[in-house]
Amino acid sequence: MNTSRKILSGVAGTVLIASGVGFAATSVQPATAANASASADAVHEIGDYRIESRWAEEGGALSRLANVQGSFSFNQQGVTPNDELFNVFGTAILSMCSKPALDIEAEQVGEANYYVNVGGSIEKSFTVNLAEMDADEKETLMGCSCATGSPFGQARVVGVELSKVVGMADLEEGVNTLTAYGSDGYGEPLPLQYVLDKHALLVYRVNGEELKSTAEGSSVQLWMPETVARYFTRNITQIELTCEEEAPEVGSVDPMYRNKIEIKNDASSCEFEKGKEITFEGVADDCGSAIEAVEFSFDGGQTWTVCDTEGVTADKWVNWQFTTTFADAGDYEMIARARTADGVVSPLVSSLSFSVV
């Protein structure tokens, strides 16, 4: 059995306060977690993993407050700018997210090419031009998340569902696997039924920008809802439909990096006036299970303020805001975690130190 132990801490991000993106308020006075003692030590068992999370002991005289109340709001909108999107997933080996933004930009100066070859265990191979499939065009907001590491991104993408292309092929009996190959030869096999069930998309427009490439092959990218970034293939040249003895298994997020959460306030300017409203903001994402609640602690994890995120879906991240006030001056720490619909509490929390003067 694999055991992973982490001392939890972290600060990240760009200031998003007053972003003006239509947040939906849910709990003006959030409920407080009933079982405070369970917060100090958390044990999660996911598959063969046993994850033990313990809070770090902080030095210095931190001011601690139990059951902090405030207003909470959230939405599932917002996109990662294109010049940042492909940098975010630097740990995704050989996938569309593996190249730095400068390399992506260099490739985006050629002509758009949306031709994809289809072959394998089918009656007759063929080539399809996605640009001619206007009637099947689909637009959606979709997240992309790494199997390891905390960063993630989200984009508004336009393309054609892969099922439409598969439907053009006369499949031989027993076809159960689909592999999309990029111009560099990279391709990850997927169960055909999984691809169809997830409504995988052959994308040719990201955040309103037409994809172009000087590389040999098309400009098309494969995007997969609720699927880790290793399957997001770039510059697709070939789609192979094959009969395998067993359909391949789909890789998932490392259990330590499930249910990711980040605080986006700028740590360099975290000094606030007592009695004035302070808005904390961030994002949460699980890549497979909907975020059920976002939880905050201001006393080192002894008590938690629980804010429900009713109605969210698993295919997009959750943007959250929590606003509160502090009557007394002092140095404080906010800890944030999320809880999923299948009961997983963030194995790695996010924290932010700030001062009230």
Image (cartoon, helix red, strand yellow):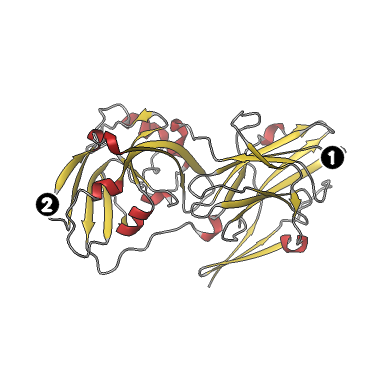
Badge 1 local density, few (<14 within 10 Å), some, or many (20+)? some
Badge 2 local density, few (<14 within 10 Å), some, or many (20+)? few
The outermost residue toward the bottom is 1
Q: Which mark is residue 124?
A: 2
The residue lying at 52 percent from left, 48 percent from top is 313
Q: Amino acid at mark 1?
A: Gly
Instruction: Judge whether 220 appears above or below 19 on screen.
Output: below
Query: Residue 136 appears in which quarter of the rendering?
Result: top left
Q: Nearer the viewer, residue 236 or 63?
A: 236
- Quarter of the picture holding the C terminus: top right
Q: Dot 1: what SS?
A: strand
Q: Is residue 284 left or right of residue 172?
A: right
Task: State the image coordinates of residue 167 (x, y, percent, origin top left).
Answer: 23, 50
- The residue beneath circle 1 is 330
Q: Amino acid at mark 2?
A: Lys
Query: Residue 86 appears in which quarter of the rendering?
Result: top left
The residue lying at 33 percent from left, 46 percent from top is 233
Query: Residue 195 appears in which quarter of the rendering?
Result: bottom left
Disc 2 from disc 1: Cα separation: 72 Å
Residue 207 in sight in this render: yes
